[in-house]
Image (cartoon, coloured by chain):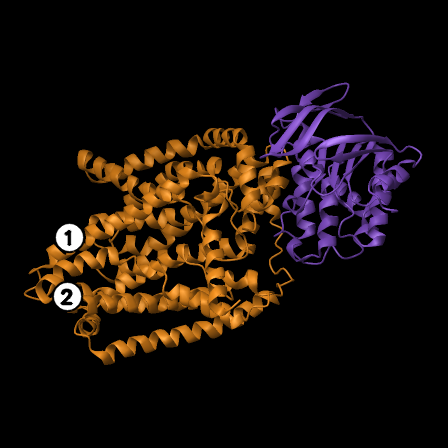
Amino acid sequence: MNKYQLYKLLRKNEDLKNKRHPMFDKNRFMKFLMVFMWLYYAAILIFMGVTMAIGMKGAYNGVAAFHVLDGWFPIVLLVDFWIRFVMQDTPVNQAKPYTLLPIRRSFLMHTYLIRSGFSLGNLYWGFMLVPFGLIAIAVPFGWIKFCGWLLGWWLLCIANGFSYLFVRTLLTKHMAWLSLPIVIHGAIIAMMFVPEHNWLDMPCTVLLNAFANWKVLYIIAVIAIIAFLYYANFLLQNTMVYNEISKKEEVEVKNTAKMSFLNRYGRLGEYLKLEVRMRTRNKTPKMQFAMGIGFMLFFSLIMYFTDAYDGGFMKSFICLYNYIFLGLTTLIGVMCHEGNYIDGLMSRRESIYQLLRAKYYFNSLLLIIPPLIMLPLMIAGKMSVWMNLGYLFFTVGVIYPILFQMAVYNKDTFPLNQKITGKQGNTMQQIISMVILFIPIGIEKLATLALGDPWGYILLMCLGIVGVTTHKMWLKNIYHRFMVRRYINMEGFRATRNS
Amino acid sequence: MNIIIRNLKKNFGEKVAVNIDSFDIHSGEILGLVGNNGAGKSTLFRLILDLIKADEGTVHMSSAQTDINVAETEEWKDWTGAYVDDSFLIDYLTPDEYFQFIARICGKNPEDLQQFLDKFQHFMADEILGQKKLIRNLSAGNKQKVGIMAAMLLHPQILILDEPFNFLDPSSQSAIKHLLKKYNEETKATILVSSHNLQHTVDICPRIALLEHGVIIRDIDNSNGQAQRELEDYFEIND
């Protein structure tokens, strides 16, 4: 078998892996939803491209529309970078099944890195950029400029993809590496939003304008950066795959706190201990928690030091987001981590009910963190106390009950301690996440419009209090529905364990 | 506690995994389940434990006081202990924490737990308790020991162990055989054990069911150890 044939075989296996994923294999509706969501986001991007091209035309004192967009391209790349966490796997993970086969490791790494570079995902932003460029560049300035400009964006997306792979692979070594993109991206955002004029506007515009004008030196420079990132990834992935094969787990447990104070709560107390240990001893939940705190701090700091998010909607969005983020990241996949030991749980009486209760109390307790982080914003008058109280109660009493419904339907086991994200989360979970992000703001805005300022938040509070006081009832209901669906769910958990 | 199986059927696609018209396991019996790979031993255990849905039929657990269908209530979980595979283990706990967890949710107090662990000191061989190791970092054999012990921890009236001798070193295999026999003698519990090791099965099980393609093709009396020859002939071990 020559190298090309081997490459084709690896590509075929990768395609089969995606196609035969247990989540989609027997679920035509899920397949349909995936295609639907793909088209939906594409349509949003096309809409954004067209409206921005028309809206920016002549809106900035004669500056060409594409120069305006180019000035903000770091934001697109930042969004692109973080979205990759839920979409893109690392070559280390992809190569792992082949590491003991007689295939050169370097060949595997090159194969997967090249596939990452030329992945169609790097062209997804094209849904926004092509219509934008057609209107704002091709028509007024010609096709050659348009093609050059598009090439520039594509190369920058590839470079961004390789940066992501580098960070993502380092994260499997230690979570502290997350601070690398947070610091860099924080600095970029600070340079764009803190000064009166965006400091990155000029260099970004110059760079993409150079592509539009096919300035070879700039193109070579960006390709050289890609080559550098490619090589850095190659070295890192090569080392990491070796570490994966000869992996030695940390054997001594550091955290062996007995949490005896929970003993007084009987069986519930034991499930609470279990929840705490699950969150503190496994890489995936620890990472989710760290990311949650990171995002909260990030947005709160921007809000505190800039006026970027001073609009009413953005204030509400950030406040709500800070309250729901920790719960959303874990509860949207509620029971998915337990899929790893579902048979053990199911062989104990009413264990799922106690587990759900423990999860509810634990996640409710975590809501102490957001108001502490947002306290300076409240003191500075950038956010009202009513808003915080409204979203706090709404989260614990309405959003959590909605998220807990997923316990009835989730049937994919998530790895506890292997990777940070991978393909975690199906389309149903994504849709619920979207609903949860925007419905409360809608309710609050409508109530505020109808009743005046604090009443929107008071309504949210009242709705939340109803949910809190009836929590045992709706948790019991979820538990009963889970038991009705138990065979389907257990089969799903077993099928997706270690997949 | 008796286990009453009636008209139990489970197919995976075209493949018949379990097809048992009628089979009773009597209270206080140790039943050995043997069969080739894919015979349906684990599937039968999972059906008895209500972990998969039967296409047809029922599994009842009954005694003089009670008779329940396992698919209709969770009551039987109070008197049933099982270890089928490592999906029964919560691997981010240490064995000490795992035993405490199981003991507490089953209503055992710390003294009961300590007494129980004392009985297993020899079996654990100083490699399980007090190691500050998570279950996921234990060897396969030690994980197996933790699973078996956790299944026995609530002093079940029905104990179900799928291939309990797997991964265990010879002295642990011998130890678990003695522990199971002793447990059966002391508690009169009903014990179901599946194994590919015919010798161990014959040693501890007075009754052995031979399962092939989901069907119990022989119900062998082994009260005097006479099943050895029949099983060896069936599996063509001496050819």
Q: Is residue A104 visible?
A: yes
Disc 1: host chain:
A
Residue A113 image offset from top left, x and y in percent: 43, 67
User: What is the letter of the orange chain?
Assistant: A
Which percent across, then down, holds residue A286?
A: 49, 56
**Residue at the image point whose x is 26% and y is 76% from the top:** A219
Q: In the image, is B235 to the left or to the right of A468?
A: right
- The residue at the far bottom in this view is A217
Quarter location, residue A303:
bottom left
Picture layout, residue B69 above or below residue A442? above
Q: Which residue is mark 1?
A: A51
Name the residue beneath numbered marker 2.
A143
Q: In the figure, the purple chain has which letter? A: B
Query: Residue, x 29% and y 47% (percent of image)?
Result: A39
Query: Callout 2: few (<14), some (14-19), or many (20+) C-alpha neighbours within 10 Å?
Result: some
Q: Which residue is at the front of the view, B168 or A434?
A: B168
Q: As drawn, is A96 to the left or to the right of A165?
A: right
Q: Chain of mark 2?
A: A
Kind of residue at disc 1: Thr
Give, as a three-letter code, the residue at label 2.
Trp
x, y percentage for residue B227? 89, 36
Nearer the observer: mark 2 or 1; the answer is 2
| Label 1: few (<14), some (14–19) or many (≥20) C-alpha neighbours in 10 Å | some
Q: Secondary structure at mark 1?
A: helix
